Image: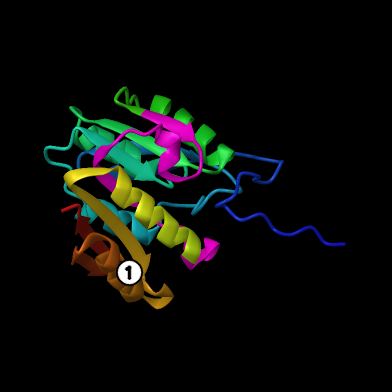
Amino acid sequence: MNRPTPHYFSPLPPAQVRSRLIRWVDGDREFGFRTAAGVFSRGSVDRGTRLLLRAVDATGARDVLDLGCGYGVVGIVLAHRAPAAHVTLVDVNPRAVALAAENIHLNETPNADAVCGDGCGAAGGRTFDLVAMNPPIRAGRATVLRLLREAHHCLRPGGRLYLVARTSQGAQTLGRLMGDIFGRVVEVERGGGFRVYEARHV
């Protein structure tokens, strides 16, 4: 009997691991990220993540959540852009969280921490000014909708959610569903087959 292929949005990633180091530049800073099999986009920083980071405005944020952090690119970059903020990186995949924790240390990011758990509940009831999310589309719409509702619940009044999705994988539908939850949603970036939406907690 064939074993099912584990999905990166899973608490049980593959047992064997060989990490690699990739590099990415944001502004005048070069970041190094350890990646491995069993995590999303292990070979390079994907186009959706790059577009998300182009769109996110962390100005004034005190507490930031990278929801579904993978190996930590979004959370770590935002922590360096907003050094007065504290950034929490959350993922259900223990390998991703271990890599994110390693990358926090590798990139000397004292205002960030990585937590293993499913969704906003892993943040222990804390609330945030900003949530960034590259959702696990392949985990299914029900999972993505649950995460969107959790993000709405953990945002402070006036807080913002940024979400990136591939246009061909239902980004516009996700934007409409975000509108049902948040009320106010704006498309703030588009390019490379992706769209980024900003929703505000009102």
Residue 4 appearing in the image:
yes
Q: Residue at x 25, y 67 (%)?
A: 179
Q: Classify residue 56 as left or right of residue 73.
A: left
Q: What residue is disc 1 on?
A: 177
Q: Residue at x 26, y 54 (%)?
A: 162
Q: In the picture, which quadrant includes the N terminus?
A: bottom right
Q: Classify residue 138 as left or right of residue 29.
A: right
Residue 130 inside the magenta-drawn segment: yes
Q: Position of residue 128 (x, y in %)?
A: 26, 38
Q: Position of residue 131 (x, y in %)?
A: 29, 46
Closer-to-camera residue (140/165)? 140
Q: Position of residue 20 (x, y in %)?
A: 54, 40
Q: Residue at x 41, y 54 (%)?
A: 147
Closer-to-camera residue (85/37)? 85
At mark 1, the secondary structure is helix
Which contiguous range is marked in magenta?
A: 113-141
